[in-house]
Amino acid sequence: MSYTAKRLLLTGNHAVAWAVKRVRPHVAPLYPITPQTPILEKLTDFQSKGELEGTELLTPESEHSAMAACISASLTGVRVFTATSSQGLLLMHELLHYAAGARARIVLFNVNRTPASPWGFWPDQLDSLSQRDTGWVQLYSESPQESLDTTIQAYRIAELIGVPIMISHDAFYVSHAMEPVEVPSQQQVDEFLPPFACDHFLDPKRGQSFGAPLDQQNWNRSRREMAAAMARVFAAVTDAGKKWGETSGRDYAPLECYRMDGATTVIVTMGSMCGTAREAVDALQDKGNRVGLLKVRLFRPFPVAALKEALAGVSCAIVLDRNFSCGLGGILHQELKAALYGLKPAPKIHGLLSGVGGVNVSVNKIKQWVSEYAGAVPVNESLWVE
Amino acid sequence: MECIDYQDVDIFHSGHVACAGCVEALSLRVILNIVGQDAVAVVPPSCTAVICGIYPNSALSIPAFHTSLESAAATASGVKRALLAKGKPDTTVLCLAGDGGTYDIGLQSLSSAAERNEDILYICFDNEGYMNTGGQKSSSTPEGAATGSTPLGKTTRKKNLVDIMAAHRVPYITTTSPGHILDMKAKVKKALQIKGTKIIIVLIPCLAGWGVADDAGIKAARMAVDSGIFPLYEVEDGERYTVNQLARTQSVKPYLALQKRYRHISEEQVEQLQIHTDKAWQQLLLRADQQQ
């Protein structure tokens, strides 16, 4: 089967809006926030032109209410989309827990932006990483094309497993940067994504209620069931990435190993910094250095087994964190150390706080850090670098 | 004595866990009886959330989603939009909230739903405080009333939610009470005929929270209306005011005397409450008169 995809020059945010147009959610509650707003505006633009007719767009007074409407719409048995960023995601925090506990099949697109205070608008992953215990699947995207492709795949995963999924891309570096993006045809997406179906929903004919107060044992059971669902996500992400590759020619996996064959040093990072690191790896390999890149695309569930496998035999891992958990360090750095605990032989792990607050990380900087840290003795703490 | 023609279609079942004598349970039964089976309920934390029972039981035969305290109207909006998308525009979506979840923490999302004129029926069971958490003040608690957080009596007045929501120009907002079952039934029926945001505030004398006898819930509700402290009235499209019971047959004093939450107040405070009640009543009549 061949499809006629079209190639458009799109920002990361508009690429997401195109994906949403193709997946045709039934309900999309949206609230504006910089730098997410172009997603909202592109969707309302589509609708004003009659190109998004089956979607109920809802514009409540806050992200909190947007998420409340997402949860209940999903539980009423329809496909749901929302998008936000930074403060908006943080305002949703309470309801992110609610959504996961209610097993709502929501796809949320988050544009990674520094949380206030002080007030900033810059790429930093602390907003979404600080939601890592809410029970949402988290995927990170490097480019507009990946954001479009991942949004489409996310619906397949969310609806198969019964979990909410959050996809993030970096403010401005991805959200507002334009790149040629291949937009799949409607038929291509319809064939990839089955129509929305779920067995249990708010149905007057059946009278089944959701979220009623319960005892300790049943709350405990709800978490065990969420854990069992989470355990199926890695395979579902793998499968969706492969299937999407078959139809689009663009494969995706929970982790991407870039030029890691024979690499003794591996850069580990997420989001837009992967693009910069890729260039640094190319430049270093050209000069005979055995350096690779491990891109973490799936952050929750944290792909522990796959990370162990990918890093087995590597002598040094350098983690680049564009986030900072005050009192601990770079979040990816800390999580990776925990994941590799007990692995023998384990790579030496350096954690570099390298793009916190959106400060620019250049190809040359990454090359410099590799030469500085590849042979050095690692310390427990994440290190501030510039 | 009113003789009430009442046939229960059993939407709200026996076996619920309301306190003995609770008039909120009675109100739920009456309201859901009119609403019928083709409905989805949204319940934020409140007495109703508990009354409906502990998982896996439910006292409701309609489905309910237990949402967060501040989100009832937004949650109901999500249900309604999903039903519209599914081609089921006739299913009633109703909120069953308390005054904390309405006057206080839920006001923002209610305001937004009203501004969008979402097609929902919002029921506020107003027991004038956070009674489910043991009886603390909300912005619906009237002046003088002692609560867990105002042990000396609240010093400020009850928020006028009807005026606030009327200012949103919702198609229908009204007050009713479990002491006026026919009024309650008629208003629910009327609300179901109207498209857009409908709000019904039901005064619920809380036996434990207000300190009234187990069999005095209905009596307290009637006295609240008869004294004019809680008038029965409705506002349509934010402008047409109708007072449903024009007779004020008693002063506020016996109403206050019925409740332990007012037992500490002085004669001067009773006097002050009477003055405030009289003034609010006159303002209400003026608004209703101006329509004619």
Image (cartoon, coloured by chain):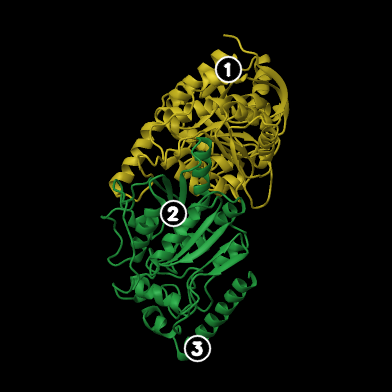
Give the numbered dot on residue A188: 1
Circle 3 sits in a helix, a strand or a loop, which is it? helix
Residue at 50% across / 52% down in the picture? B193
Q: Is residue B217 left or right of residue B282?
A: left
Q: Which sits earlier in the primary sequence, circle 3 or circle 2?
A: 2
From mark 1 to mark 2, how far is it between C-alphas?
Answer: 41 Å
Disc 3 with disc 2 on a shared chain = yes
What element does badge 2 sit on? loop
Mark 1 nearby-residue class (10 Å; few <14, some 14–19, many ≥20): some
| Chain B colour as displayed | green
Does residue A283 appear in the picture of this structure?
A: yes
Which chain is the one coloured yellow? A
Circle 1 sits in a helix, a strand or a loop, which is it?
helix
Q: Position of residue A119 (x, y in %)?
A: 68, 50
- The image shows residue A53, relative to residue B182, as above or below, that is above
Instruction: Report the Cα–Cα distance between label 3 and label 2.
Output: 37 Å
Q: Amino acid at mark 1?
A: Gln
Measure the alpha-carbon separation of dots 3 and 1: 75 Å
Question: Which sits in the foreground, A111 or B130?
Answer: B130
Q: Is residue A272 visible?
A: no
